[in-house]
Amino acid sequence: MHYKSTRNDKLRVTAAQAIAQGISDEGGLFVPESFPAVELSELLELDYIGRAKAILSRYLTDFTEEEIAQCAERAYSAEKFENDTPAKVVSLDAHGENKHILELWHGPTCAFKDMALQILPHLLTKSLKKTADGKTAVILVATSGDTGKAALEGFKDVEGTQMIVFYPENGVSPMQKRQMNTQEGENVCVCAIRGNFDDAQTGVKKIFTDEAVKAELAANGMMFSSANSINWGRLLPQIVYYFSAYLDLVKAGKIALGDAINVVVPTGNFGNILAAYYAKRMGLPVQKFICASNRNNILTDFIRTGVYDKKRAFYTTISPSMDILVSSNLERLLFHLCGEDAEKLTAWMNALSQGGAYTVDADTADAVRTLFYGGCCDDEETVAVIRETFGRDGYLCDTHTAVAVGVYRQYLAETGDNTPTVIASTASPYKFPDSVLDAFDCEKPADGFEEAALLSKLSGTAIPKPIAALQGKPVRFENTCDADDMADFVRRTVGV
Ligand SMILES: *Cc1c(COP(=O)(O)O)cnc(C)c1O
């Protein structure tokens, strides 16, 4: 198995190269040259780790079986994920509906990013051994909240790596900020940016392609690498839980092997939903991908019109991990749907960076619309969905998951399509207690931990251990810088 770039379809690199490098030299994203088929029945009786090994080994053909087993076992062990399975499915099908919540937040940081970021450091250090002998990987992360903490937790004290996380100063929840600023580990560092998530992401992308900085690092035995969701090592592990959820539903008797499902994903950078699309390419019978956005509904517009236009207001919402204007992984989907034509794709991406917009051709727009449904929910609807889902189904969801549930309802009302549906639940409600409490009739305390305690009392659910443990931790990082000074911050931190 080799990988090509979305902006250079002649290029061929190994999986280890793709993972070690993160982004291709000309700015494109690595994609597999083909999608290996898997037999669903073959994975049915395996546990999560077994399913992960089976799927990973089809893509990581330059890794040994033993290496893959080691990565999967270290990442998804019972110490890391509180349940007996890392990705649990909760069926809410009592009212004639056919919805099943895929809880992806039982890892150490209570967000779905753990599913990928617990395994990425192992994939990355093995990839670096194969491709960049002895070099220290400097990993830069731009985060709208959850990635940062999950990356820090995954990489802390991993030998041969150094990590710097940038987040928008006012674009993450107090609990997320606290999670990051109290992070332990000798090789990690956190910095707030005066700007929004896109400023942070653009800044990181700029540093990655800055030849001067790259040369300074190389002279000091270091190289850049990425843990953002553009890294193939992030995307690949996410394919696993869609297969696993489907097979768990088969085993629970909710669907029969071969039945079609729909998938709903609360979407930001388009990584999670793209992994579902990749699962389909490998044989998972997904009929419709329902892409849920908050008030930053650029993807809803794109799916409906074929026009991607980022010249619009950016909103800070109560689902901050989805506050994004440029969804990087959409580039991969468009590459596959436009006939893997790197030239065409490059022209669109250049139009986006130079003019702020692009329009895909009619065939590509049709292909997107056939597979995807786009919808959005504002903050008010999101809170209403949390209230109603708790009242009707007795299920407490976080603000991101609520956006997905809300858009799923719109889809049902519009189409009447009652296909069994897997809704990705991407964070614990306890990461956003302030907003989730708005769904309850109560006086809110000022402190986040008191809010969590109140939420626990009102909902009859338990505070996840990693969140309860934050309370006593000292703050280690209080850095802030302008988006323009990010490169210098990196230089100072790594000492070049
Ligand atoms: C990152 C994140 C998302 C968005 O996922 P993408 O893969 O970037 O589309 C949604 N919800 C939560 C809680 C997240 O942390």
Image (cartoon, rainbow, N blue to C red):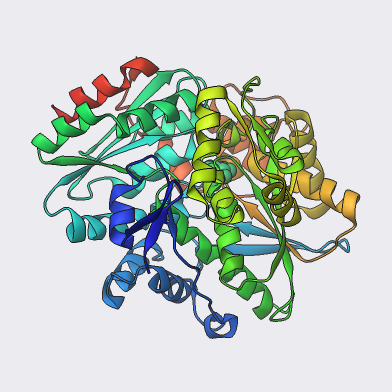
Estimate the x, y position of residue 379 in percent, counting from the top left: 73, 30
Estimate the x, y position of residue 348 in percent, counting from the top left: 56, 37
Q: Which quarter is ligand 1 in?
A: top right
Residue 390: in sight, yes or no? no
> Relative to residue 150, is residue 209 drawn left or right?
left
Q: Is residue 353 above or below residue 428?
A: above
How many circles with numbers are drawn on the protein? 0
Query: Between residues 81 and 60, which one lies in front from this camera angle?
Result: 60
> Relative to residue 47, is residue 435 drawn left or right?
right
> Relative to residue 404, is residue 314 drawn left or right?
left
Query: Between residues 24 and 395, which one lies in front from this camera angle?
Result: 24
Q: Quadrant of the N terminus?
A: bottom left
Residue 114: in sight, yes or no? yes
Q: Is residue 167 above or below residue 292?
A: above
Q: Residue at x 67, y 78 (%)?
A: 250
Q: Residue at x 20, y 25 (%)?
A: 491
Estimate the x, y position of residue 62 in percent, counting from the top left: 28, 69
Q: Residue at x 77, y 45 (%)?
A: 407
Q: Residue at x 40, y 56 (%)?
A: 4
> Relative to residue 129, is residue 44 drawn left or right?
right
Q: Is residue 254 above or below residue 301?
A: below
Q: Quadrant of the C terminus?
A: top left
Query: Between residues 253 and 297, which one lies in front from this camera angle?
Result: 297
Estimate the x, y position of residue 102 in percent, counting from the top left: 63, 59
Q: Is residue 21 above or below residue 278?
A: above
Q: Residue 381, located in which quarter of the rendered image? A: top right
